[in-house]
Image (spheres, rainbow, N blue to C red):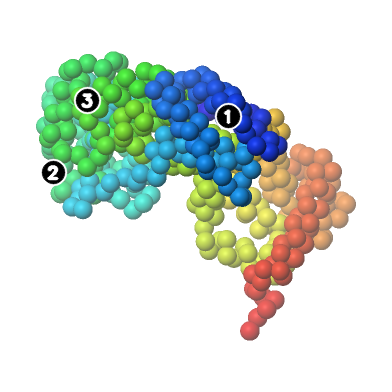
Amino acid sequence: MFDTLSDRLTSVLQNLRGKGKLSDADIDATAREIRIALLEADVALPVVRQFIAQIKERAKGAEVSEALNPAQQVIKIVNEELVGILGGETRRLNLAKNPPTVIMLAGLQGAGKTTLAGKLALWLKKQGHAPLLVACDLQRPNAVQQLQVVGERAGVGTFAPEPGNGVGDPVDVARRAIEEAGRAQHDVVVVDTAGRLGVDEELMRQAADIRDAVSPDETLFVVDAMIGQDAVSTAEAFRDGVGFTGVVLTKLDGDARGGAALSVREVTGQPILFASNGEKLEDFDTFHPDRMASRILGMGDMLTLIEQAEEAFDQDQAEKAAAKLGSGEMTLEDFLEQMLAVRKMGPIGNLLGMLPGAGQMKDQLSQVDDSHLDRLQAIIRGMTPAERDNPKIINASRRQRIAKGSGVAVREVNDLVNRFYDAKKMMQQMAGRFGFGGGGAAGG
Ligand code: GDP
């Protein structure tokens, strides 16, 4: 997602580097290039026009900065404008003061509503909520069952009409579900509704009827980012037919050009709340306009990376590790534990992709893969506990045994042991300097 746009914008902005002063002609040329990049990414024309006008006006305006050179100044402006069209501040989910909070999902068939219901449920559950999924898509065959399946995977309950009673009335189901939520103490209710392949009146009326029956705190318009320009007209149809308070972009993992993401907010005036980027329930997160903008401009996404790290390493474990590192007591066992924690953060290529400048290192990054970590893990697992505790005892014959057992060359075992000692030395030096990890050494 956004790869092409990101490449284009980065190279346009790079052309400005080293210029001491930007003439109006420079700015016009840059604006033209940015315009082409946005149109190629399928961003809606009115949005592009306004974006370009803003960039030109601001770049030519009197915003002189002592700290930034002219190129950096333009990058800063483009970044701020991108954040702006993506919605500015991160918009959090509105929770009702008096539970249950009702969240209604609307969108075309195939947009990813049912999948989203599961993702949202898991996400809410992780934050301590007790969500209930409600099956109001009684049209699509299997939709109810599909919702029950994602509900089970997320570990939350699903409210559905009893089978065998004919098609059933989605409005009635929605109403009864809210009562059930009150009884069973669910504090959030997620209502999945029917979608059609295209926008039609019947669909809109049904969604509006459900809306009137449950008075949602949030109505989320779910849109497949891969449908390109159509996203805008679909969003407008749903805005006029049902109304919504927020947008969820799905399938951001696809290789689409990303124009939908950049247009929907500006065209409908409603913020993007979440982004979905995969078929697994975990492939889902709050949408942060600022982070998305830096990602598009190849400035990396350090904040997401840091958050993922915080999730993967629990505080306790991190403190214990720090203490051990500082006191020089780190063993290969700890090393393995750290490595496993890093892996929990996702495929290593994805993680590296979030680092600043990663866009331009794509080729190198594609070579860093999980199989390298797999080999390191295999080597450590091939050691006895005594060897992991005290790598000093790993002599030549032990190295050979370990290499054989883990299916690698002796050279790789040597490499790992050497790297472990380097890391240990570095950590001890750092600990000395920053004064962490008193552990056993300081004592009293
Ligand atoms: P609904 O008709 O709106 O309920 O859509 P579904 O939830 O059934 O999703 C339609 C298809 O899109 C399913 O095959 C999902 O697995 C897939 N899907 C949903 N969200 C995503 C996503 O973020 N990325 C990808 N790659 N596929 C998704």
Badge 2 density bin: few <14, some 14–19, many ≥20, Cα 10 Å: few
Q: To which residue does mark 3 refer?
A: 240
Mark seen at residue 46: none
Asked whether 239 or 50 is in front, the reply is 50
Tell me the residue at 22%/46% (across/down).
101
Q: To which residue does mark 2 refer?
A: 179
Quadrant housing residue 345: top right
Tell me the residue at 27%/37% (across/down).
245
Mark yes or no: residue 422 visible: yes
Residue reaching furthest right?
396
What is the distance, in whole Å, between disc 3 and disc 1 at their CAs?
Answer: 41 Å
Q: To which residue does mark 1 refer?
A: 24
Asked whether 319 or 337 is in front, the reply is 319
Q: Position of residue 122 (x, y in %)?
A: 37, 43
Tell me the residue at 34%/46% (across/down).
92
Q: Considering the numbered disc 2 on the image, is that residue within a helix, a strand or a loop?
A: helix
Q: Position of residue 266 (x, y in %)?
A: 36, 31
Left or right: residue 346 compared with residue 263: right
Q: Nearer the viewer, mark 3 or mark 1?
A: 1
Q: Position of residue 362 (x, y in %)?
A: 66, 31
The quadrant of the image that shows the C terminus is bottom right
Tell me the residue at 16%/48% (across/down).
182
Asked whether 40 or 381 is in front, the reply is 40
Q: Amino acid at mark 1?
A: Asp
Counting residues from the N terminus, which is met first, the one under dot 1 or under dot 2? 1
Marks 1 & 2, CB-CB < 8 Å contact: no
